[in-house]
């Protein structure tokens, strides 16, 4: 199924068969495509690019399709990778999976400041939700690991070494 090209987001590169590989919902996903293109919020004289997830309800393209600036896509990837690392290497040291007195997991330097990654202690059900999150990460380990290995390989090809 071809994604729309007549809307405000103007695709330049697309993965129109995304629904076949969309994680646990592969084959039954409403996310039918991914694209990188010209952002829908562009003003005259200013061009930003964005990533978009194209959702299809079976009858029409959904208004719930999401468009994100590329730096936010990468920030989410950084957050996912840091979460995976935390649960693999650190969380086991704490009976509750984190230290309630020091919930900060990391500060990752970006743009002269830092993204603070911490356990969301404002969540009234954090202990239960953290365990559910940990279980879901473990359950999806192969699915996520495959994508992280591909990302690592491509970053290596780009010359991005830590």
Image (spheres, grey):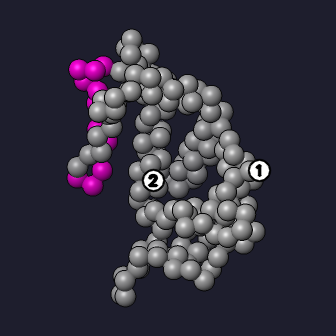
Number of marks: 2
Residue 56 drawn at (x, y percent): 66, 64
* Residue 28 visible in image: yes
Q: Which residue carries the number 2 mark?
A: 74
* Residue 15 visible in image: no
Q: Which marked residue is nearer to the observer: mark 1 or mark 2?
A: 1
User: Which mark sits nearer the N-terminus, 1 or 2?
Assistant: 1
Residue 114 drawn at (x, y percent): 26, 46
Q: Magenta segment: does it hold 105?
A: yes
41 with respect to 112 (left or right): right
Q: Which mark is drawn over residue 88?
A: none
Quadrant in the picture for the C terminus: top left
Q: Which residue carries the number 1 mark?
A: 27
Q: Which residues are magenta?
A: 99-112
Say which residue appears at 62% left-offset and 62% top-offset. Answer: 55
Sort mark 2 into few (<14), some (14-19) or many (20+) by Cα contacts within 10 Å.
few
Sort mark 1 into few (<14), some (14-19) or many (20+) by Cα contacts within 10 Å.
some
Q: Magenta segment: does it hold 78?
A: no
Rendered position, 70 above or below 24: below
28 with respect to 140 (left or right): right
Quadrant in the picture for the N terminus: bottom right
Rendered position, 141 above or below 78: above
Say which residue appears at 39% left-offset and 27% top-offset. Answer: 125
């Amino acid at each position: 199924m071809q994604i729309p090209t007549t809307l405000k987001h103007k695709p330049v590169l697309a993965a129109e068969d995304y629904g076949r590989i969309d994680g646990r919902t592969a084959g039954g996903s409403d996310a039918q495509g991914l694209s990188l293109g010209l952002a829908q919020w562009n003003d005259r004289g200013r061009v930003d690019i964005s990533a978009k997830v194209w959702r299809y309800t079976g009858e029409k393209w959904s208004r719930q399709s999401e468009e994100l600036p590329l730096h936010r896509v990468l920030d989410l990837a950084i957050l996912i990778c840091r979460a995976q690392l935390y649960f693999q290497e650190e969380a086991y040291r704490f009976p509750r999976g984190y230290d309630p007195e020091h919930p900060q997991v990391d500060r990752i330097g970006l743009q002269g400041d830092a993204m603070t990654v911490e356990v969301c202690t404002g969540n009234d059900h954090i202990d239960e939700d953290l365990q559910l999150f940990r279980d879901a990460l473990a359950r999806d380990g192969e699915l996520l690991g495959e994508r992280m290995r591909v990302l690592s390989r491509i970053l290596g090809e780009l010359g991005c070494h830590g």
